[in-house]
Image (cartoon, grey):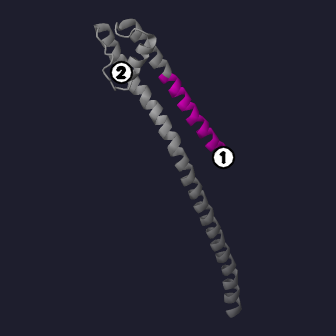
């Protein structure tokens, strides 16, 4: 059981790392694309800023796509950015929920253990009572 929990934790963290890596890759490529396609993005950091504000659908308006090519590219950045940023958010949420899930699993295991002990105790009582009843019937008949 402990290996399963450890495996889930590693996969969850790995999923977050992969999601963040993919997010950085898409934002980096988006920044590079905007730097090449958009005349207002004079530096690579301007391209990154435009890629981030576009992917996050914030759109502050300080730099906006002005050419047809950069507007078309911004549509791609929005679609990919929404997907990847959603993955990152979902990975973080899954890690937070996992902590609570472990607590619930632990409580359920304690309850199951207590029920098994109670069933064992009742079984022992029943098996102990049946031979005594048979002896009483045999002696009384």
Residue 5, horizontal then vertical, whole percent: 62, 44
Residue at x-position 28% and y-position 8% = 68
Residue at x-position 35% and y-position 8% = 38
Tell whether 61 sits left or right of 51. Answer: left
**Residue ranking furthest to the bottom:** 140
Q: Which mark is residue 140?
A: none
Total numbered labels placed on residues in the image: 2
- Disc 1 versus disc 2: distance between alpha carbons? 43 Å
Q: Which of 100 and 37 is in front in this view?
A: 37
Q: What element carries label 2?
A: helix
The span picked out in magenta is: 1-23
Disc 2 designates what residue?
A: 54
Binning the other alpha carbons within 10 Å of mark 2 as few (below 14), some (14 to 19) or many (20 upward) gives: many
Residue at x-position 37% and y-position 7% = 37
Q: Earlier in the sequence, mark 1 or mark 2?
A: 1
Tell whether 67 sits left or right of 55. Answer: left
Q: Which of 136 and 30 is in front in this view?
A: 30
Residue 57 lies in what quarter of the image? top left
Vertical placement of 7 versus 107: above or below? above
Asked if residue 18 is among those painted magenta in the image, a careful observer would answer yes
Residue 85, horizontal then vertical, whole percent: 43, 28
Residue 92, horizontal then vertical, whole percent: 50, 37
Disc 1 designates what residue?
A: 2
Binning the other alpha carbons within 10 Å of mark 1 as few (below 14), some (14 to 19) or many (20 upward) gives: few
Asked if residue 12 is among those painted magenta in the image, a careful observer would answer yes
């Amino acid at each position: 059981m402990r290996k399963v929990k450890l495996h889930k934790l590693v996969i969850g963290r790995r999923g977050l790392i992969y999601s963040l890596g993919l997010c950085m890759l898409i934002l980096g490529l988006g920044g590079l694309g905007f730097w090449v396609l958009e005349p207002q993005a004079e530096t690579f950091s301007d391209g990154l800023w435009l890629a981030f504000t576009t992917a996050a659908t914030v759109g502050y308006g300080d730099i906006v796509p002005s050419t047809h090519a950069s507007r078309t590219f911004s549509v791609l950045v929005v679609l990919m950015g929404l997907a990847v940023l959603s993955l990152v958010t979902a990975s973080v949420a899954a890690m937070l929920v996992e902590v609570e899930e472990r607590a619930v699993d632990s409580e359920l295991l304690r309850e199951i253990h207590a029920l098994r002990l109670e069933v064992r105790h009742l079984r022992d009582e029943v098996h102990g009572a049946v031979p005594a009843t048979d002896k009483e019937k045999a002696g009384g008949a």
